Amino acid sequence: MSTMSTRSAWRALHYSAKRRAFQPATPFRCFSCTRAAQDQSKQDQERMTHFGFTNVPESSKDRRSLQLRRLLLRHNERPDVPGNPPHLEGPLRPIPKPRIPLSARINNPTQKGWNILDIAGGTGDIAFRMLDHATNVNHDIETRVTISDINADMLAEGRKRSIDTPYYNTPRLSFVEANAQSMPHIPSNSVDLYTVVFGIRNFTDKQAALNEAFRVLKPGGVFACMEFSKVDNPVFDAVYKRWNFSAIPLIGQLVAGDRDSYQYLVESIEQFPRQEEFKGMIQKAGFMIPGRGYENLTGGIAAIHKGIKPIKA
Ligand SMILES: C[S@@+](CC[C@H](N)C(=O)[O-])C[C@H]1O[C@@H](n2cnc3c(N)ncnc32)[C@H](O)[C@@H]1O
C-alpha cells in the first residue's frame, strides 16, 4: 500500500471530496435559517455525527455516501480531471456479475491463496494492485479479492475498470455492496486480509466497522488501514494545514467547479482521530498491535495502521 501512486492518491482525494458534492443544501450548514430551527427537535432525538466540521444526524451520513451516483460517473468521464482517461467512447458496456454466491466464494476452506476483503474499495485501484502483487511477485494465482463498498455506483466504476485487468470475470475478483459497519452476509472468521484505504474516515461509526473487521477476519488474519492522518512536526503541520484549508478547496473549485466538496474533504481529514487514538480503537476491537502499530507516510499526512486478530481470541 505504501507504493500508492500520485494518480490513486488523487483519485481517493477526488472521490472523498465528491461525496460532499451530492449534499442537498442541508439545514445544518446554515446555522441561522428557519429550517434549522424547525428540524431542531428531530435533531435532538437523533444521535449526531460529524460531516466535515458540520454535525449531522447519523442516519443521514450513510445516506450521503450513497448520493455519489450519477455525478461520479459524469466526473469520471471528464478528461480534464487528473487520473481520468483522456477520452471515453460509446455507452458503458453491460458488465456481467459473477454467478457463484458470495458466501460460497468467501468461505471455501478448500480454496488456496488468500481471501482478501477490500472495504470501501469501489474504484478497484487497491484490489487490482493486491492481485497484481500476488500474481507477479508471489506467483500466487489463487488469492482473490472481494471489493466491498456502500455505494453501488462506485462498485459499477470498479467493475468498469476491472474490464482492463486480467481478473475481469474470474473467481479472483468479486464485488459486494455493503455498509462496512454491518456485513452479515460475510461469515465470521473467513477473511485473511482486510484492507480499507482512504475509506474509514468517512464511516459514521468507525468503532463498529473495526469490530466488524475483527469478526470477519480469521484468527491470525490481518487488518490494514491507510488513512489521512496527523502531521507530527508542528512547523510542517502549520504549513500543511494552511495548504489544506486554502489550496485544496481552491483547486477543487478550479478543477471540478466544486469548492464545498473539497472543503468537506479537508474538514474530514482534520476530524479523523490522531494515530495513537486510532490505534487504541483498533485495540479496543480486539486486535493485537504489531510493533508501534502504524507507519507514518510523509510525516503523518497519511498513516498505515495494522492489527492482527489473535489466534486465540
Ligand atoms: C475515497 S473513496 C475510497 C477509494 C478507494 N479505497 C481508493 O483508495 O481508491 C471512499 C469510499 O468509501 C465508501 N464508503 C463510505 N462510507 C462507507 C461505509 N459505511 N461502508 C462502506 N463503504 C463506505 C464510499 O462509497 C467511497 O467509495
Image (cartoon, grey):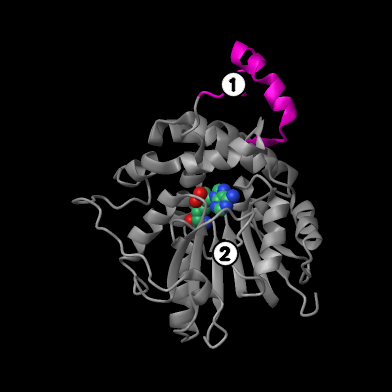
Image-quadrant location for residue 175:
bottom left
Residue 292, horizontal then vertical, whole percent: 78, 66
Rendered image: mark on residue 238: none
| Mark 1 vs ligand 1: CB below 8 Å | no
Looking at the image, residue 138 sits to the left or right of residue 37; the answer is left
Q: Mark 2: which amino acid? A: His
Any part of residue 31 in sight: no
- Disc 1 crowd rating (10 Å Cα; few below 14, some 14-19, many 20+) is some
Residue 238, horizontal then vertical, whole percent: 68, 38
Q: Which residue is mark 1?
A: 27
Count every numbered label the image shows and give the total: 2
Q: Is residue 257 or residue 44 the one in the foreground?
A: 44
Residue 6 lies within the magenta run: no
| Mark 2 vs ligand 1: CB below 8 Å | no
* Mark 1: secondary structure: loop
| Marks 2, 1: nearer the viewer | 2
Image: magenta residue range? 25-51
Image-quadrant location for residue 124:
bottom left
